[in-house]
Amino acid sequence: AGLLARVDEQGDAGRRADERLAAIDAAIPRALSRVGLVQFQAFEDVGGGQSSALALLDASGSGVVMTALHARAGTRIYVKRVIDGRGEGVLGEEESQAIAAALAQAAYPSATR
């Protein structure tokens, strides 16, 4: 009887694990899986390429591109949405490059079982 109870517990644990794996499989396409970073010199009086554009995208190419413009007087940060690989609104050259770099990476493949 004790052995049968443990077998039933293992069956229940296996079903719960399958449910968790199915939830993870469903979430993978929305997870950030593509990253593109471009560093550049935004202003001539500030050297060293301290400004950056960072694209964080999911498998469909949606997410955000964040740009930090470093100047002597301070740093400004801008965030723009990206939907299906296209930015909302006008993108700067470096933002477009960061998105292109992120899209060039393979997204996480969906799990097959």
Image (cartoon, rainbow, N blue to C red):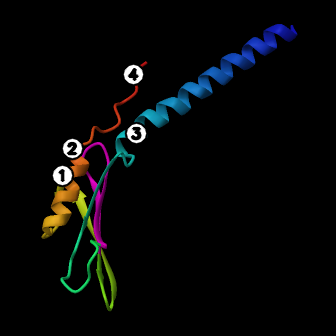
Residue 5, given in percent of the width and then of the height, sits at 80, 14
Q: Are marks 1 and 2 in contact (CB under 8 Å)?
A: yes
Q: Which mark is residue 45?
A: none
Element at label 3:
helix
- The residue labelled by disc 2 is 104
**Residue placed farthest to the bottom in the image?**
73
| Most frequent secondary structure within the magenta stretch | strand
| Residues in magenta, as a range | 50-68
**Is residue 53 highlighted in magenta?**
yes
Residue 73 seen in render: yes
What is the distance, in whole Å, between disc 1 and disc 2 at their CAs?
6 Å
User: Who's the residue at 16% across and 60% down the image?
Assistant: 96
Of pointers 4 and 3, the one earlier in the residue sequence: 3
- The residue labelled by disc 3 is 28
**Residue placed farthest to the front in the image?**
48
Element at label 2:
loop
Name above or below for residue 54 compared with residue 59.
below
For the residue marked with disc 2, what is the amino acid? Ala
Q: Nearer the viewer, mark 1 or mark 3?
A: 1
**Is residue 32 highlighted in magenta?**
no
For the residue marked with disc 1, what is the amino acid? Ala
| Front position in the image: 100 or 90 | 100
- The residue labelled by disc 1 is 100
- The residue labelled by disc 4 is 112
Of pointers 2 and 3, the one earlier in the residue sequence: 3
